[in-house]
Image: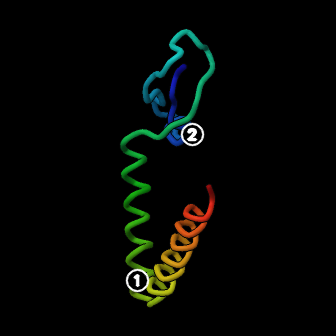
Amino acid sequence: MKIVCSWCRQEGKPELVGEKAPLDYVQETYGICVLHRRAVEARWQVSIQTVSRSGAATELFSAIFRWTGLLNTTKKIRP
């Protein structure tokens, strides 16, 4: 099975990222190449910095911690 980067395909660049089992399977699956992954990570970093400057980060992180606390509690309750 071939792994292709849909961003590369859209830009008209060579899109093959790699292959995975089963190797004789002719269909494609989608992944992300290293260049586009780095671009996405850079955009995430910018958005995180923007949120942290606005003060909304504290609210977001506290909501995440509450949610993970609830998940941990439900894991302990379930057999």
Above or below 40: residue 34: above
- Dot 2 amino acid type: Gln
Query: Dot 2 lies on which element?
Result: helix
Relative horizontal placement of residue 18, taking residue 30 as reference (left or right)? left
The residue that label 1 is drawn on is 52
Q: Quadrant of the C terminus?
A: bottom right
Q: Residues within 10 Å of mark 2 (few under 14, many from 20)?
A: few
Residue 3 screen position, x and y as percent: 51, 28
Above or below 15: residue 11: below
What label does residue 77 carry, if any?
A: none
- Dot 1 amino acid type: Ser
Depth check, front residue: 74 or 29:
74
The residue that label 2 is drawn on is 10
Quarter of the figure with residue 53: bottom left
Residue found at x 54% / y 15%: 22
Please identify the residue farthest to the front as the structure is shown: 79
Q: Residues within 10 Å of mark 1 (few under 14, many from 20)?
A: some
Q: Earlier in the sequence, mark 2 or mark 1?
A: 2
